[in-house]
């Protein structure tokens, strides 16, 4: 009981500083989680789902799901839909958001394109305060707990909040590289659970990029033809929180295998860890489907948490070469999507 009440106090006092958006390890595989400018980048009907289970041991479990669908509807315009759901077992906190996405393509030259993207939708945060025990429910003489309260509806009014949310980003991409910037919560919606409260949601900055090293002309028979090495990085910042993921993924026409390193480049305390987790990643392609899996291995003092499991399933259908401007078309499993060669 005391633990729950203490958490609520800390939640109200510190939410503005500590609030963090859900993030995904396999951002390179499902770049729609990063930037609305990726909408329609595969030049095909594309849809996918992701499930992330963080610290699955007991009450510390945190589940996050992400789903998307998009397509390039004209030569320059992409449209899509995204859904995000985030649930914390211990606090009973739930965050749900559904958004529409739009992208516009500007051909800069033969090699490079500029993609502009916007995202807008509605979010809902639910904290389920009904599970709390209020002070007047406790009999200090006997220790008994009454099922009712003098003000039984005091927390009911603050269980849920709804808000409008807007994000934007841009992306430069070519056959072998991509670099983008996205900012979430541009309108800084009020997410306070208190009546007449004012807790603007902190903006979330992401700077992300990737570069493909081709092995088409490799003399070694150990490297399959058409293989490449994706070198990628993703810097994220929201309020006091910052994270930089760097790593590489070796990709063939059938599978991908690599490792990403999650780091804390701006350590705020003397005992903070620079390397926070080591994340092996893999993917397998079956026809029009791609299955991905990653496991985050914690390297800090927060041990015995059983790590973080993340699953993804991507489907692409009906790649339309009439929009490829008569260039050769190549399918990328990573952030480059379907690009010209």
Image (tube, helix red, strand yellow):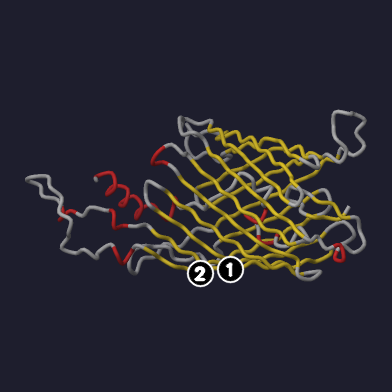
Q: Please, which residue is most extreme toward the left here?
A: 141
At mark 1, the secondary structure is strand
Q: Position of residue 325 (x, y in %)?
A: 90, 64
Q: Residue at x 12, y 45 (%)?
A: 143
Q: Determine the secondary structure under disc 2.
A: strand
- Find residue 251 and name its label: none
- Say which of 209 and 157 sits in front: 157
Q: Is residue 99 above or below residue 89?
A: below
Near mark 2 (Cα within 10 A), the count class, few <14, some 14-19 or many ≥20, is some
Residue topped by disc 1: 120
Compared to residue 241, the image places residue 114 above or below, namely below
The picture quadrant where one finds residue 195 is bottom left
Q: Are marks 2 and 1 in contact (CB under 8 Å)?
A: yes
Given the current orientation, which residue lies at the most extreme front position?
287
Instruction: Give residue 125's position: percent from left, percent from top.
Output: 43, 61
Left or right relative to 81: residue 89? left
Residue at figure coordinates x 85%, y 35% from the top left = 224
Judged left or right of residue 131, residue 90 is right
Residue 293, by quadrant, is: top right
Camera-side residue: 310 or 245?
310
Is tag 2's residue or tag 1's residue first in the polypeptide sequence?
1
Q: CA distance from mark 2 to mark 1?
A: 8 Å
Residue marked by disc 2:
164
Which residue is depicted at the point 34% across and 62% down?
Answer: 159
Q: Residue at x 75, y 52 (%)?
A: 288
Coordinates of residue 226 in the picture (x, y in percent) = 86, 41
User: Relative to residue 171, is residue 77 depicted above or below?
Assistant: below
Where residue 335 appears, as percent x and y from the top left, is 73, 50
Q: Is residue 322 left or right of residue 120?
A: right
Q: How many marks?
A: 2
Question: Dividing the picture into quarters, in which one does residue 255 lie?
Answer: top right
Within 10 Å of the Cα at label 1, are there few (<14), some (14-19), or many (20+) other Cα atoms?
many
């Amino acid at each position: 009981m005391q633990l729950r009440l203490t958490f609520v106090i800390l939640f109200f006092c510190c939410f503005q500083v500590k609030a963090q958006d859900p993030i995904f390890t396999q951002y390179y595989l499902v770049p729609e989680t990063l930037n609305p400018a990726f909408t329609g980048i595969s030049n095909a009907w594309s849809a996918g789902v992701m499930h992330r289970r963080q610290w699955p041991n007991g009450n510390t479990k945190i589940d996050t799901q992400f789903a998307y669908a998009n397509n390039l509807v004209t030569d320059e315009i992409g449209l899509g839909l995204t859904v995000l759901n985030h649930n914390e077992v211990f606090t009973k906190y739930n965050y749900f958001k559904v958004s529409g996405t739009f992208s516009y393509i500007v051909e800069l030259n033969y090699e490079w394109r500029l993609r502009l993207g916007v995202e807008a939708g509605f979010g809902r945060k639910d904290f389920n305060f009904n599970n709390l025990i209020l002070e007047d429910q406790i009999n200090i003489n006997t220790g008994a707990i009454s099922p009712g309260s003098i003000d039984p509806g005091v927390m009911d009014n603050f269980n849920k909040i709804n808000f409008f949310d807007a994000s934007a980003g841009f992306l430069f991409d070519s056959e072998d590289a991509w670099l983008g910037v996205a900012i979430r919560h541009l309108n800084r919606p009020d997410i306070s659970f208190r009546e007449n409260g004012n807790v603007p949601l902190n903006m979330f900055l992401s700077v992300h990029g990737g570069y493909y090293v081709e092995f088409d002309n490799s003399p070694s028979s150990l490297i399959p033809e058409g293989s490449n090495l994706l070198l990628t990085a993703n810097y994220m910042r929201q309020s006091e929180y910052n994270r930089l993921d760097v790593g590489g993924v070796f990709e063939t026409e059938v599978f991908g295998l690599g490792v990403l390193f999650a780091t804390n480049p701006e350590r705020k305390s003397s005992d903070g860890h620079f390397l926070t987790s080591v994340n092996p990643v893999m993917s397998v392609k079956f026809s029009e489907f791609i299955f991905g899996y990653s496991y985050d291995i914690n390297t800090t003092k927060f041990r015995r948490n059983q790590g973080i499991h993340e699953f993804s399933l991507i489907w692409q259908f009906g790649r339309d070469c009439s929009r490829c401007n008569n260039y050769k078309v190549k399918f990328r499993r990573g952030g480059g999507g379907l690009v010209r060669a």
